[in-house]
Structure formats: structure tokens, C-alpha cells
Amino acid sequence: MPRQIIDLSIAIENDVISDPAPMRPEVKYFAHADTAGQMATYFPGLTRDDLPDGEGWAIEQVSLATHNGTHLDAPYHFASTMDGGKRAITIDEVPLEWCMGAGVKLDFRHFDDGYVATPGDVETELKRIGHDLQPLDIVVVNTRAGEVHGNDDYIDTGCGMGRDATLYLLERGVRVTGTDAWSWDAPFVHTAKKWAETRDPAIIWEGHRAGRDIGYCHIEKLHNLEKLPAAGFEIICLPVKIKAASAGWTRAVAVLNE
């Protein structure tokens, strides 16, 4: 049966606003003409004229945080403990079985920016799409942020998943979730306004902090979620293996059987 693969990842690139200014990646490009001398250092006596068209190799130097680009957060990112007190696992310890599974898409594009989704919202959407959650389903949330990636307002756009909504998924065996927004939680600019009014610290990073109770991972800065059906596809989001790290980049994809 033919398969369709949908790329769910954003590119790591310069000059696209996918992170706050201090956290943005930097890619330096070295073209073939730039590296002939570099290649010659490995072969004494070699000159540029000896090389085809005087060219060396193309290579890039990349400065990245583990949370740039489409990435998978490990439980260690959320807190030092998980599962009610156990040591939180790092990205190199995440079970790979978590990272390949049946995909489920919750369409929350109609929610206002800064809205914090509830268990009732999740139940309503699951009922609408006719899906019963299964252990190790990978649940991704399509927010309005996916429409504005690369724009100045990307980081402040989209709804977030609250603590109770996150636990609703985790209690049913979900261990990987995802969002096309900058964060699994509501954008900080909106939460900061609520914090100024309530001074309730429980609202800060509440979706992430659910991992203290039940360890889980989530993918942030997904792309093309609007191209996915509600269910009936597989997600693969294997992370780069970085020792003792809080996250790893992933070329997340969806596989649809046609």
C-alpha cells in the first residue's frame, strides 16, 4: 500500500523568528570556493588549482540550543523528578518506543491566543473525531501558531495545554505529545498578564510541570499539522542522542497509508 510522508518539522535557519532573540540559532555557510585551502591542509603540496574547478567542500557551522527547531523535550527539562519523585530521565534515556506510534490530532485552532485548554476541551475534541485514546498514542495539538510561523508574533500565538488537560492524556497512557506552537504551555506573554492579576505560581508552565506527576515528552514547534487527518496515521519523532540533555532535535514526520 502506498505511503505518504508529511514533514512535521521546521527548518533550522537564520532570520526566521522561531525563538526569542537571545535563543535563536545561527548557521554559518561555507561554500566550495571558501574551503579549498582547508582541504589542502590535509594534503601537503596540494593547491586550489589542483582541485576540480578550484573547489573544496561545502560545510556549515551551526550554533544551536537543544530547544531550537523542532525538538523533543525530555522529562528532565520540566523538573529534576518525574513519576512522583523518581529521577527525571534525560533525552538519551527516553524509550524509543515512545517516539513511534499512532498519531492523534486535536484541532484547537479556534481557541484564542493564550487560552489554556482543559480536560473538557480534550474530551470534546476526541468525541468529535471519534477516537478513544490508547497507550502510547502520540497526541499533537494544532493551534493557530502553525499559521504564523516565521512572523514576528509566532512566539505569542496559539493556545496552550493546562496541567489537567496534560494529565488527562498521560493518565491514559500517552507519553509523547506535541504542538505547533513555541511552547506546550500558553505563550508566556499571556500567562504573565494572568500572573500579574492572580500571583498564582501554579499557572506558570503548568502543562510542562505535569511531568512531575507522570513522566512524558513533548514535541514543540511542529509544522504542517493542518495537513494531517484527525487519526489513522503514524508519527515518528526519534530525538538526536545528546548525553544527559533536556531535549534533542527531531525530524518529526507523519506516515499516512493511502
Image: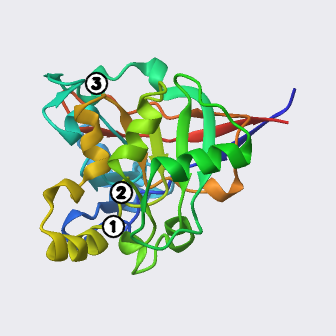
SS at circle 3 = helix
Say if 60 sits above or below 195 in the image. Answer: above
The percent position of residue 195, horizontal first and vertical second, equals 18, 70
**Residue wearing tag 1:** 187
**Disc 2 to disc 1: CB gap under 8 Å:** yes
**Residue wearing tag 2:** 183
Question: Does residue 5 appear in this view?
Answer: yes
**Residue wearing tag 3:** 92
> What residue is rendered at 22% in x and 33% in y?
212
SS at circle 1 = loop
The percent position of residue 172, horizontal first and vertical second, equals 49, 27
The percent position of residue 152, horizontal first and vertical second, equals 39, 81
Say if 189 sits above or below 57 in the image. Answer: below
Q: Amino acid at mark 2?
A: Ser
Q: Which of label 3 and label 1 is nearer to you?
A: 1
SS at circle 2 = loop
Identity of the residue furthest to the bottom in this view: 152
Label 3 to label 1: alpha-carbon separation: 28 Å
